[in-house]
């Protein structure tokens, strides 16, 4: 999955649920804050599916279990 698609999907879900969304470029990663949950995503063009699922799973407290499906 493309990195921009991962961030785009997360941003769309945040907007749909009325949560705040903030993105900041760090040294080697992109920091993402949705609501009260923080996480980082590596700055690679392509994110493998397992990594994308684990990244999405970190936001389960904000959106519910398996929200990305």
Image: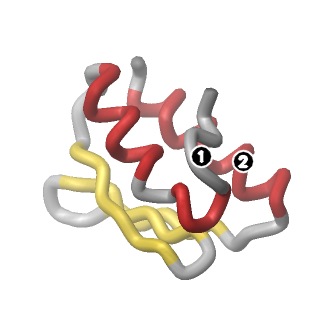
* Residue 5 position within the rendered picture, expressed as x and y whole percent measured from the top left: 53, 28
Q: Residue furthest left?
A: 28
Image vertical order of residue 5 relative to residue 16, above or below: above
Image vertical order of residue 19 relative to residue 54, above or below: below
Q: Residue at x 74, y 69 (%)?
A: 19
* Residue 63 position within the rendered picture, expressed as x and y whole percent measured from the top left: 66, 57
**Is residue 46 shown to the viewer in this render?**
no
* Residue 6 position within the rendered picture, expressed as x and y whole percent measured from the top left: 49, 34
Q: Quadrant of the N terminus?
A: top left
Q: Residue at x 22, y 45 (%)?
A: 42
- Dot 1 falls on a residue whose secondary structure is helix
The residue identified by callout 2 is: 13
Query: Marks 2 and 1: CB-CB under 8 Å?
Result: yes
**Residue 32 relative to residue 20: left or right:** left
Q: Which mark is residue 10?
A: 1
Q: Residue furthest bottom?
A: 36
Alpha carbon separation for disc pair 2 and 1: 5 Å
């Amino acid at each position: 999955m493309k990195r921009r698609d991962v961030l785009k999907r997360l941003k769309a879900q945040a907007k749909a649920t009325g949560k705040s969304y903030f993105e900041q470029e760090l040294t080697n990663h992109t920091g993402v804050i949705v609501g009260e949950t923080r996480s980082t995503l590596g700055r690679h063009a392509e994110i493998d599916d397992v990594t994308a699922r684990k990244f999405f799973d970190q936001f389960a407290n904000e959106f519910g279990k398996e929200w990305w499906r």
